[in-house]
Image: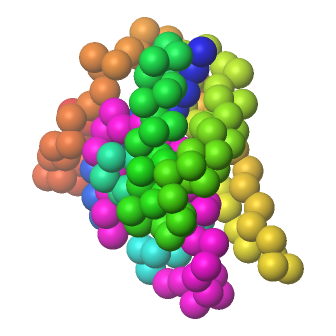
Amino acid sequence: MKLLRTIRLDASDSFVFEKPAEPGEWAVSGAFAFAYGDLSNLHGKARTAFRAGFLGLESLGRSTLAQIVETNESDRRDVVEMLAAQLVKCFGAPDLATAGVAAEQEIGFVASLCGHPPGVLVAVTRNHQDGTVREVFRTLRPRDGAGEDDVPGEHVDLAALEKGQRR
C-alpha cells in the first residue's frame, strides 16, 4: 500500500505559499479546501496554493511536491482519521461519521495516484473552468543515486550562485 507525503527539495514553498507544509506530512490533493470560495478572486499565494499545492494534513499547509511512500493499513487508518478530524474542525463537515466517508474517498483517490514505485515525486496542476475544478497530476522520478538522505538542505548560497558556482 502506498500514499503520499509532502517533500521539500528547496526553500521555494516557503516563498510561494502562505503556509507551507512541513516535509514528511501525509498529503492529499486538497482541492476540497477551495470548494466554497470564489476561485476567480484568488490572487498571490492563495492562487498558487489552488493551482499547484498538495495539502499537508497535520499543518494544513501546502507543498508543491508529494512523494510516494510505502505504508501499511494502520497508517492508512490513522491518515483517514486525521483527515476526518480536520474536515470537521476546519472545513465544515457536520460530524466525524460524515467526514470519515469523505476522508475515505479522498485517501482512496490519493492511493490511486500511487501506482508508481516509492520515491517517485508527484506534482499537481489545478485550474477552474466552466464551474469545474480540473486537476492534472504528473510524476517526476528522482535522479539515479538520489535518495531521501540526499535531499538538499534549505540553505542557498546566493553569492556562490551569482558567481556561477554550485553548492
Residue at the spot 51% in from the left edge and 25% down from the top edge: 76
Q: Is residue 63 left or right of residue 24?
A: right
The quadrant in which the C terminus is found is: top left
Residue at the spot 47% in from the left edge and 46% down from the top edge: 83
Residue at the spot 50% in from the left edge and 14% down from the top edge: 72
Image location of residue 48, percent across then percent down: 50, 68
Image location of residue 151, percent across then percent down: 31, 27
Q: Is residue 40 magenta?
A: yes
Q: Is residue 151 magenta?
A: no
Image location of residue 13, percent across then percent down: 35, 55
* Residue 138 showing in the rendered view: no
* Residue 4 showing in the rendered view: yes
Residue at the spot 56% in from the left edge and 49% down from the top edge: 97
Q: Indicate the colouring scheme.
A: rainbow
Q: Is residue 15 above or below residue 151?
A: below
* Quarter assignment of residue 26: top left
Q: Is residue 128 above or below residue 40?
A: above
Q: Is residue 89 left or right of residue 38?
A: left
Name the residue furthest bottom.
41
Compare residues 9 and 21 and report the one nearer the observer: 21
The quadrant in which the N terminus is found is: top right
Q: Is residue 35 left or right of residue 96?
A: right
Compare residues 38 and 92 and report the one nearer the observer: 92
The segment highlighted magenta reads 17-43
